Amino acid sequence: MKAFVLRKVGEVGVIDKPIPEPGPNDVVVRTTAALVCTTDVHIMRGVIPVAPDVALGHEAVGVVHALGSAVEGPALGQRVAVAGITPCFQCDSCQRGFSSQCRGQMLGGAQFTNRRDGTLAQYFLVNNAQANLAPIPDGLSDHKALYATDMLSTGFVAAEHAELGLGETVAIFAQGAVGLSATIGCRLRGAGLIIAVESVPARQQLARRFGADVIVDYTRCDPVERILELTDGQGVDAAIEALGTPQTWEATFRVTKPGGRISNVGYHGEAPGPLRIPLEPFGYGMSDKQVYGGFNRGGRGWLRRIFRLMETGKVDPTPMTTHEFGFDEIERAFQMMASKEGGIIKPLIHFGPADA
């Protein structure tokens, strides 16, 4: 099969690899469509260390190609999706509700690329398949289903961790695909005022489309001052960090009112120094502010919940797809994601019939 891999830090490419063989609890999926994630760019830059020639990617859908001997439920040829994390759902961490920290390891549920080949390949393996594979409903396109695998999953977790009550206020820092998904999630949870911090006009437009009430352009004003003005100096009930920079991290503390919540889903590995907490906005440690860092939840049941929102017309994430490519153009798609060329947000990758 063909697979898009990390050759070494700073270098990616397409190589031939053997089609994976399923173990007893595994399923092998033939890929039909995928998305490229900024996390793949982090890996290429060496921020997340992985083995050379491992396939990148963790956002894909396809059809069941091969079944492990102990797998019940999925059928050969069935359309399926799998989340960007594939926990075991049997260990203590999973049983406690922290599936992304599977087996007690930090982000241990993130198997793709980190522990085996990812999904930017003609075939990929899914561990603990009965728990991790979700059938795609007949009325749902591959394109929509793809967004449940990571972007909506992670953005919705951000909104849940913000613990928004009906009519409460929230500020969301950055409107990339995860930030936009968090905006959708906050709208679904009944936020009364959604403030999106974003400078790119196309992303500002999407943020409004997905539910943002006010856009704050940080290139035109101090976003902290503006958010405080919009909330009569009180600050928001919750703030979501969806970018992963020290500046946005600190800003969430400055705009959140005492007793508020800070939900972080931004990846902070690009600036690996310790993150600072501004002391006065944190009440010198006594502000009753809660801080929650989370990630994609994974699992069949979680994906089904997101599918239901799309089936009933409450969510359509596909406007985030700004570009489309065939798998033979994957290197070009990846380069555009790395440089953010052409206003790219998410590139959709179409896979044709696979040749081993």
Image (cartoon, helix red, strand yellow):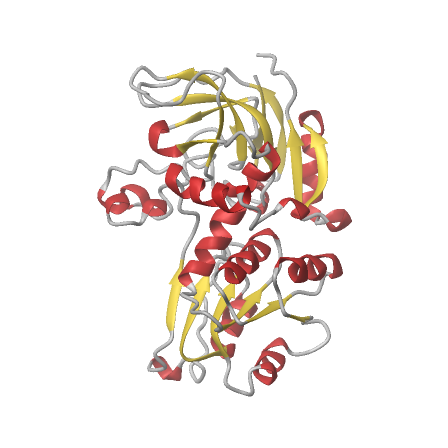
Q: Nearest the camera: 351 or 304?
A: 304
Residue at the far top: name it. 356
Location of residue 195 in the rendering, given as x and y in whole percent from the top left corner:
59, 70
- Please tell me which residue is depicted at 35% across the width and 42% down the height of the picture: 108
Q: Nearest the camera: 168 or 17?
A: 168
Q: Is residue 16 above or below residue 243?
A: above
Location of residue 222 in the rendering, given as x and y in whole percent from the top left corner:
65, 78
Residue at the far left: name it. 92
Q: Nearest the camera: 60 or 328?
A: 60
- Please tell me which residue is depicted at 51% across the width and 68% down the height of the picture: 191
- Please tell me which residue is depicted at 56% across the width and 50% down the height of the picture: 314
Location of residue 120 in the rendering, given as x and y in whole percent from the top left corner:
57, 30
Is the C terminus in the top left, top right, bottom left or bottom right quadrant?
Answer: top right
Residue at the far front: name it. 312
Is the N terminus in the top left, top right, bottom left or bottom right quadrant?
Answer: top right
- Please tell me which residue is depicted at 74% across the width and 57% down the height of the picture: 202
Count of numbered tags: 0
- Quick check: 205 left or right of 142? right
- Quick check: 293 left or right of 342? left
The part of the image, by quadrant, that contains residue 274 is: bottom left
Residue at the far bottom: name it. 233
Location of residue 354 in the rendering, given as x and y in whole percent from the top left corner:
60, 16
- Res 286 visible: yes
- Res 53 visible: no
Q: Nearest the camera: 39 or 46?
A: 39
The part of the image, by quadrant, that contains residue 215 is: bottom right
